[in-house]
Image: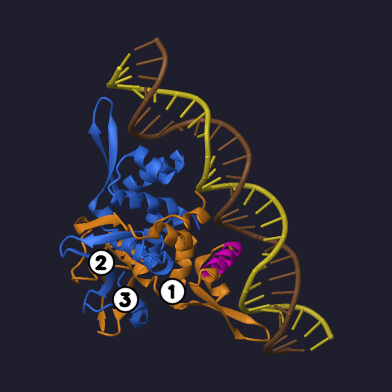
Chain colours: A orange, B blue, C yellow, D brown
DNA sequence: TTGACTCCGTTCCATTTCAAGACTTAGCTG
DNA sequence: CAGCTAAGTCTTGAAATGGAACGGAGTCAA
């Protein structure tokens, strides 16, 4: 299976992976969430091959996850910003960060701490049910194809 | 950067990606959450190259995400099951499914429906703050390095 | 006005990874 | 014995990646 075939699979995970399913793309998004916006900064922070970075940014822009925006003329300079669609990836990124924190942290604790400014506390994300609000245990979930779709 | 270098980055996302950060691994895990357990079934369902499947399963076993378990002798046959560490990936998978549902679903709705057996409703996952229980908006989060670690 | 510098790419080439399918092994089954 | 199944290996050509050099449009400082 090739990347573009993923897109036409009848599976939301496959479709998501067709956009963000490679290592570099997710690291680029990490930087974006850390407010990195310029080509050079992405490149320096990640040590990614420039060609690959060019390609990944273009793909994310094409998919509407990032927006390329000229922040100055003469010379023209661009920055890449998360769109709302890009911000919507936050739960996915954080879920992965949480998993890393839980299973691969140093004894001294996780590498970074997240503070929720609305409540003022350091926190981690919790995955809850949209209907009852309880924490979701995968064993308490049943899946069925959507006949309508 | 190579895959094994990712592992030693001081970043939980990078560490997570060193385990599940490629397209095939996540699709293998999707199947595992759908209760697929055997080599042949993973291979048929995904159409993955057998060599790649062998390699990915071995990697997941090595990382303790899956467990290889002989379910019969003579001839020896194995199955791959999610460990607790594997089940802990559920929030990450679901966050990606949600994103696909939101941004790439057909007009008729998402491809599959999830039912929460504890409350009996069809649901989607919601990412909330461990401290105040509110839905987390990425703009309301500040990040800082953990000095202790 | 010259030379150094910045940003954002391109181009080239050697290395690595992947896709696809044939082949292997061990043990059934008829 | 011939054929079948599960779980891999092996082979080969195609694609992606890493690394490093190059380009071009413009700024800056001397």
- Magenta region includes residue A52: yes
Q: Which mark is residue A114?
A: 3
Chain letter for the residue marked with disc 1 in the picture: A
Q: Is mark 1 on a helix, strand or loop?
A: helix
Residue underneath mark 1 = A85
Q: Residue B122: image x %, image y %?
A: 24, 64
Q: What residue is rendered at 17% in x and 60% in y?
A: B117
Q: Is residue A3 above or below residue A95?
A: above
Side of A73 where C30 appears, left or right: left
Please tell me which residue lies in front, C12 or A88. Answer: A88
Residue underneath mark 2 = B123
Furthest-left residue in this view: B118
Chain letter for the residue marked with disc 3 in the picture: A
Q: Residue B148: image x %, image y %?
A: 30, 72
Q: Earlier in the sequence, mark 1 or mark 3?
A: 1
Q: In this view, does A100 lie above or below C24?
A: below
Q: What element carries label 3?
A: strand
* Disc 1/disc 3 C-alpha distance (Å): 22 Å
Task: Say which quarter of the image contains residue A38.
Answer: bottom right
- Where does the magenta region start and end? A50-60
- Residue A137 visible: yes
Local packing at callout 1 (Cα closer than 10 Å; few below 14, some 14-19, many 20+) is some
């Amino acid at each position: 299976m090739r990347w573009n075939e993923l897109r036409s699979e009848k599976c939301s995970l496959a479709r998501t992976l067709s956009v963000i399913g490679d290592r570099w793309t997710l690291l680029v998004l990490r930087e974006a969430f850390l407010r990195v916006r310029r080509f050079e900064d992405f490149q320096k922070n990640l040590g990614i091959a420039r060609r690959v970075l060019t390609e990944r940014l273009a793909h994310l822009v094409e998919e509407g996850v990032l927006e390329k925006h000229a922040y100055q003329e003469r010379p023209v300079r661009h920055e890449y910003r998360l769109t709302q669609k890009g911000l919507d990836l936050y739960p996915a990124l954080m879920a992965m960060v949480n998993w890393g924190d839980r299973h691969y942290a140093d004894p001294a604790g996780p590498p970074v701490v997240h503070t929720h400014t609305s409540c003022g506390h350091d926190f981690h994300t919790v995955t809850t049910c949209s209907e009852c609000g309880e924490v979701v245990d995968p064993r308490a979930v049943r899946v069925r194809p959507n006949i309508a779709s």
